[in-house]
Image: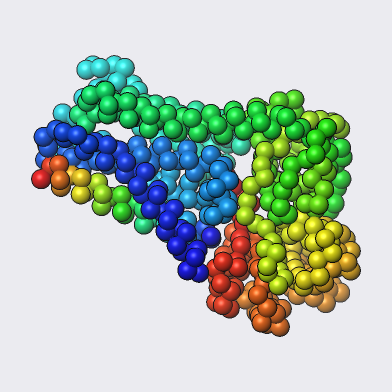
Amino acid sequence: MSQKWARRLAILLGALLLGAATLFARVQGG
Amino acid sequence: MGKVVWRAGLWGAAYLLLASAPLGLALLGSAPAGRGFLIELGVALGLVGFGLLGLQFVTTARFRWVAPYLGTDATIQFHRETGILALLFVLAHPTLLILVHREYLEFFDPRVNLLRAVFLAAATAGTILLVVTSLWRSSFRLSYERWRLAHAVMGFGVVLVGLVHALQVGHYISGPVKQGGWVLAAALPIGLLLHTRLYKPWKSRRRPYRLMGVRQDVPEVFTLLLEADGHPGLRFSAGQYAWFTVGKTPFALQQHPFTIASSDADPTRLELGVKELGDFTASTMNMHMRTPVFVEGPYGSFSLDPQAQGAVFVIGGIGVTPALSMLRSCRDREDGRPFLLIYANNRWHEVPFRKELDELSGQLDLEIVHVLAEPGGDWQGETGFLTAEILERHLASRRHLDLQYFVCGPPPMMELVEKELRRQGVPLKRLHSELFDLV
């Protein structure tokens, strides 16, 4: 797997984790 | 292509699940009442940041079941990228909370709680330093060894402070079950650190090698000869690399990754091709004969597939060592498959292992295309930097074969070659690239 893929995967994961954090805040914080 | 993407997707999903585990843990059982969206978002960013920090220890634990799937340098690159990601999440956590409620500043106020303020400030600074010193190590004039020690100590410290902080705040972590879960989750990265830095060197102690010779090949390139000291040697596949520690103890901080350049047919005798670049390689000439060398490995997925119909190596400079190992091994096995080596260097007299490669071309079905950036007056071959045209010219006649492509060299060259090979229709699963600039 090339390095570019590593970067893309990391960026994608970052976005998904931000989404998970937002979902958490929605559920908890309303 | 499909298989590679699926694999990356699977690893990505596992990673995602683990990184968001602190969020899930927080909601287990009876979750406390919410404190508004922005506060909860600030808290969630901290929880995810903690998860990401913990996973940093997994990506550098040198697991054989991770690196072969992602590739070693891609794993390190991933570790770098997720390190930046962890920093962003960790910094966003106090920033957002303080922006929403000024009272949160008291976490950093030494008048309210001196110890807490000192530790949290240190952990914040530590997280920033972890990333900054890694991305710009040379600007900090940090030797590789010092950086490595500092990186491990700071990483350990930051996770520990993070854990104590989460337990002390305790909003989502009340009760012995949740607290126990958090301690266990934090024990994982700490255990991994001990595994990598203590257990693995301890294991390598049982099979020491000894330095039996240093040979200069071309200016600045040396071959180190190692011999197994009373054991059958480390079994490896040609093209793999290992971590080498020179000196009396395998626990020394001077541990360096090198590709094994010798044939995998005889693991009792290892050869390393070393370019005089870093702190370690500069001192290779001053080493005493019979100095113990501890070898941890092998690692890496840069190896020849027995099913492939042949291989093409596109190499820059000292990046030739994995190709040399594969070619030497193929010679020892009397492998009759066709090989092509496109080999970029600056000057003819600087081409590492030129003479031996010439010999190999007589013993194998091996064609070598030298590309010289600064050729002498009577040079007839390819000149300049490696270009798409040069690749096209030499690969066109081989396109009907199911070949493996190995690319190893400086980053700009690798980028160009990878892009060009993909454009020429080389499937991702047949394209292997390894960058040997790990940190």
Q: Is residue B366 left or right of residue B258?
A: right
Q: Is B11 placed above or below B135 here?
A: below
Q: In the displayed structure, does residue B218 sit left or right of residue B206? A: right
Picture quarter containing residue B138?
A: top right
Numbered disc total: 0
Nearer the observer, B130 or A30: A30
Image location of residue B23, percent across then percent down? 26, 40
Question: Which residue is painted at 81% across and 66% down in the image?
Answer: B335
Residue lying at 16% horizontally and 35% vertically, measured from the top left: B31
State which quadrant residue B168 falls in. Answer: top left
Q: Residue B256 or B344: which is nearer the viewer? A: B256
Residue at x 47%, y 38% (from the top left corner): B57
Above or below, comparing residue A16 to residue B284 in the picture: below
Q: Is residue B291 above or below residue B317?
A: above
The residue shown at (78%, 30%) is B292
The answer to whether any part of residue B280 appears in the image is: no
- Please say whether residue B414 is visible from this viewpoint: yes
Colouring scheme, one of rainbow, by chain, secondary structure, one colour: rainbow
Q: Position of residue B105 (x, y in %)?
A: 21, 29
- Can you give x and y, in whole percent of width and height, for residue B97 in the image? 20, 36
Question: On the rendered image, what quadrant is the C terminus of chain B found in?
Answer: top right
Q: Position of residue B343 (x, y in %)?
A: 74, 66
Residue B83 is left or right of residue B179, and the answer is right
